[in-house]
Image: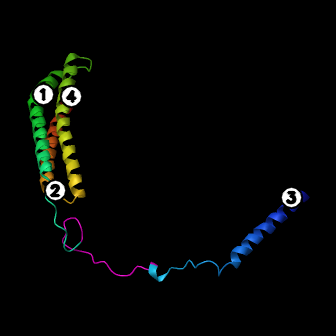
Amino acid sequence: MKKMISLRAPALAITGLFLANCAGAGDRYPSLAQRDAELVTGTLAAGGNGEDNNSPNPAPRAPLYPDIAERIEENLAEARQAHEDFKAAAPSAERQISAARGASNQSNNWAAAQIALADLDSARSAAAIALGDLDLLYADSAIVFAQRAQIEAARNQVSALIAEQDRTLSRLRGHLR
């Protein structure tokens, strides 16, 4: 027990010396109080008529680069072609699904219906890829402050095609259950 007390006494003495040094050095270190230069002054007015910001006179949007307009048209053409492929494959898929109604999942009719649905999903995926490319163009144009109305219109068109395809797929899958 005596050894513990003798070990604590030097530790307490050393700790006391450190604390005394910290307390006694008040004039050698700068104050941590906030300085005048660190104060923020002024006001910021809210409001405005900007498209994407609150400034009263927003900067005009830059026009689209010519190659972006071409890429928009390419993506629209790809989505339209995918939609045409989807519409062409849908009647066959409906026939396959009608033949598979009530069949077990081990039957040839059920397998053929699944393949027909996969074909439709593939056509839908091609349209979704075009939409993804349009989304990238839209994001890129936002970064460079380019006009996005043409890209947004194309995105809306492709989204409508995909929504129509989704409704058809949902209906057909419902018939197969």
Q: Nearer the viewer, mark 4 or mark 2?
A: 2
Q: Are marks 4 and 3 in contact (CB under 8 Å)?
A: no
Q: Gap in Å between the C-alphas at discs 1 and 2?
A: 39 Å
The answer to whether residue 110 is above or below residue 144 is above
Of pointers 1 and 4, the one earlier in the residue sequence: 1
- Counting residues from the N terminus, which is met first, the one under dot 1 or under dot 2? 1
Q: Do the residues under discs 1 and 2 have CB atoms within 8 angstroms?
A: no
Q: Nearer the viewer, residue 110 or 53?
A: 53
Q: Is residue 81 visible?
A: yes
The residue under label 1 is 94
Distance from the alpha carbon under mark 1 to that under mark 3: 89 Å
Residue to which mark 2 is pinned: 148
Q: Is tag 4's residue or tag 3's residue first in the polypeptide sequence?
A: 3
Q: Earlier in the sequence, mark 2 or mark 3?
A: 3
- The three-letter amino acid code for the residue at tag 1 is Glu
Numbered disc 2: secondary structure: loop
Looking at the rendered image, the disc whose residue lies closer to the viewer, 2 or 3, is 2
Kind of residue indicated by mark 2: Arg
